[in-house]
Image (cartoon, rainbow, N blue to C red):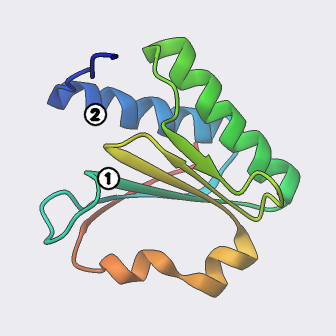
Amino acid sequence: MTGKRVKKATDTEDLLSCIIEAIKGKKGNDIVSLEIGNLPNAVCKYFVFCSADSTTQVDAIANNIEDKVIEKLSEKVYRSAGYENAIWIVLDYIDIVVHVFQTEWRNYYRIEELWADAKALRYDES
């Protein structure tokens, strides 16, 4: 039986910062975090969304997130999906779920609008 690591609030903030920097490192576009932890029926504390112009870039961003989080925080992704076609890759870090979209599919699905009442923070691409 393996022990479960208990996360502190600062761990979540460190993880969020690491994810944002990893996205910026691969030139992700339109980066947004939604603080959903206080909403009813929340499945995590944050959703992070970003866009990329190609499936190659979607894959590169998702891989960079995984690499940087392991490198800086020694934490592996709990579950991931979407690498097969790389139009929408989801990375689940329990407290934070990351959505890396190809731009046209993000515009089509517009899923972040489902949490319009969440506190949103936009990150510039600089």
Q: Is 21 situated left or right of 38 in this image?
A: right
Above or below 11: residue 108: below
Task: Please name the residue that numbered disc 1 is placed on.
Answer: 46
Q: Quadrant of residue 30?
A: bottom right
The residue at the point 19 percent across, 57 percent down is: 37
Q: Is 68 situated left or right of 42 in this image?
A: right
Q: Which mark is residue 126?
A: none
The C terminus, quarter of image: top right
The N terminus, quarter of image: top left
Q: Amino acid at mark 2?
A: Thr
The number of callouts visible is: 2
Front-most of residues 21 and 73: 73
Q: Position of residue 49 (x, y in %)?
A: 51, 59
Task: Please name the residue that numbered disc 2 is placed on.
Answer: 12
Labels 2 and 1 touching (C-beta < 8 A): yes
Front-most of residues 96 and 126: 96
Instruction: Indicate which disc, 2 or 1, sits on the residue closer to the N terminus.
Output: 2
What kind of element bears circle 1? strand
The residue at the point 56 percent across, 13 percent down is: 71
Front-most of residues 21 and 10: 10
Q: Residues within 10 Å of mark 1 (few under 14, many from 20)?
A: many
Q: Amino acid at mark 1?
A: Tyr
Front-most of residues 44 and 71: 44
Q: Position of residue 107 (x, y in %)?
A: 63, 81
Name the residue furthest front: 1
Name the residue furthest bottom: 108
Q: Position of residue 19 (x, y in %)?
A: 49, 36
Work out how far the residue at label 2 is from the one at label 1, CA to CA, in angstroms: 9 Å
Above or below 114: residue 99: above
What kind of element bears circle 2? helix
Q: Quadrant of residue 102?
A: bottom right
